Image (cartoon, rainbow, N blue to C red):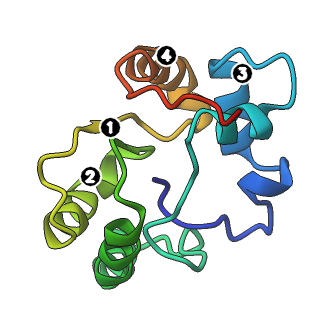
Amino acid sequence: MADSPPYNGTFFYRRDSLLYRQMREALASKGDFLQEFKEKGVFLDDLVLYPINQFKDLNERNGHRRKGVLSLAQRMADYRPGAVVALMCAIEPMVVDAMRDADLSHVPLYVTPFPRPEHQKRFKEKLTEIVQKLPVTKPAD
């Protein structure tokens, strides 16, 4: 679970975002990272479905995040995930609220900092640790 799509127009699923590059590196993907991601039953969604990282005021950003909780809860109720990973510490309270609203409080939630340059080492260490705890999905035959 990420915060929102980046304002600069990059996107995880277009393989051109900071998050894509850092996750691919952290997970030591040598092949088609997105295909490996999908085969493991993993996918990325955003708390807020439109860019909010252009807002410098934290209260304004958090307002947008709080408004995204209902929509996220509805999507999560449909997804029924076996675990959730919040890819930014600041969104943890909103993800917890969405999980509660989706009746998913029993599902494990893991949190890692977003991989901005100053957090990249910690992000990679934490993500590597988290991945080992995630439920394993068997690939389809």
Q: What type is the residue that disc 2 sits on?
A: Glu
Q: Is there CB contact under 8 Å for labels 1 and 2?
A: yes
Q: Earlier in the sequence, mark 4 or mark 3?
A: 3
Q: Is residue 108 left or right of residue 40?
A: left
Q: Quadrant of residue 85?
A: top left
SS type, badge 4: helix
Mark 4 = which residue? 128
Q: Earlier in the sequence, mark 1 or mark 4?
A: 1
Q: What type is the residue that disc 4 sits on?
A: Thr
Q: Position of residue 25 (x, y in %)?
A: 72, 21
SS type, badge 1: strand
Q: Which mark is residue 92?
A: 2
Q: Residue at x 29, y 82 (%)?
A: 70
Mark 3 = which residue? 25
Q: Is residue 84 left or right of residue 100?
A: right
Residue 141, placed above or below residue 69: above
Q: Quadrant of residue 120?
A: top right
Q: How much space separates mark 1 and mark 3, taking CA atoms?
A: 18 Å
Q: Which mark is residue 111?
A: 1
